[in-house]
Amino acid sequence: MPLDHYRSIAPLYDRVVSPLLQPVRRDIAAYIRFKGYRRVIDVCCGTGDQLRLLDAPGMELCGIDNSLAMLEQAQKSSSETISYHLLDSEQATFAPGTFDCAIVSFSLHEKHPTAALAVYANSRRMVRPGGSLILADFSRPSATPGGILYGRIAIPLVERLAGRDHYAGYRLWMKHGALEGFLDSRQVASDIICQPFGRSVLCCAVAVTAGGLSLSNSLALLSHALNPANPPANG
Ligand SMILES: C[S@@+](CC[C@H](N)C(=O)[O-])C[C@H]1O[C@@H](n2cnc3c(N)ncnc32)[C@H](O)[C@@H]1O
């Protein structure tokens, strides 16, 4: 496993960051309940705050993360019914179609585009046909007062404080059109679940169809990420 970049923030995360993300987490939980999904994986789950909101009888909840420090916090605050695994989300870990739903929240923007694509492709692969991949991340801020406050001031400031590599990833993410740009280049349709903070955050559900990502689509995704002149994949 690589260096644990979240070691220093892990003990503070649920006191400082998670409370700000509650509106998104609540809407994700409501969407999952509405759809009747039971087997749910949170990819890059951090401290497990989203999974705890879903914890209820009959749910099968699983979180994966590559930060031991974040997972220790998750285990400390969660019931034993939620299983946590120290795993790299860029690698295929569970069999295709294992889950009704996968969530990737606030974890793509900090990554190099090829790494973000690998997490996306792997998360999508783990969802059964008819299930959903829920993505929540920074979006193109609106020109409203809320969009300017959050999208142009508060979020960039927090991202800058998160460290040089993290901030470089965020800048690339925004330069490439944020979550909307990411979805456009995948050519996938998605339902918007919520778009809070002056539309500086977008949370949406991508429907996973039969067949999921074929090998040729996965390769096309990677080749497009390495060279945007190459055609994007469908998926
Ligand atoms: C900003 S936090 C978001 C945590 C959580 N999803 C949330 O909404 O609060 C990003 C998380 O992604 C994890 N992460 C980053 N790269 C990862 C990878 N390749 N495999 C697994 N976890 C990863 C980090 O350890 C961290 O816990």
Image (cartoon, rainbow, N blue to C red):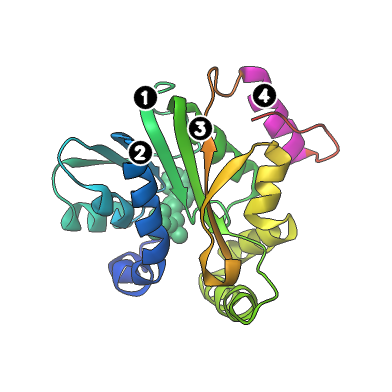
Q: What crowding class fits label 1: few (fewer than 14 Cα within 10 Å), some (14-19), or many (20 or more)?
A: some
Give the mark nearer the N terminus: 2 vs 4. Answer: 2
Q: Is residue 155 a member of the stretch shown in magenta?
A: no
Tag 4's secondary structure? helix
Q: What crowding class fits label 2: few (fewer than 14 Cα within 10 Å), some (14-19), or many (20 or more)?
A: many
Q: Which residue is mark 4?
A: 217
Q: Are marks 2 and 3 in contact (CB under 8 Å)?
A: no
Q: Which residue is mark 3?
A: 124
Distance (Cα) linking label 2 and label 3? 11 Å
Which residue is more in the foreground, 22 or 46? 22
Which residue is more in the foreground, 178 or 142? 142
Identity, as a three-letter code, of the amino acid under mark 1: Thr
Q: Locate residue 135 relative to residue 152 in the image: left or right.
A: left
- Residue name at image x 69 percent, y 28 percent: 234
Magenta part of the protein: which range?
215-226
Q: Which residue is mark 2?
A: 41
Q: Are marks 1 and 2 in contact (CB under 8 Å)?
A: yes
The answer as to whether callout 3 falls within 8 Å of ligand 1 is: no
Distance (Cα) linking label 3 and label 1? 10 Å
Give the mark nearer the N terminus: 3 vs 4. Answer: 3
Distance (Cα) linking label 2 and label 4? 23 Å
Q: Which residue is mark 1?
A: 98
Tag 1's secondary structure? loop
Identity, as a three-letter code, of the amino acid under mark 2: Ile
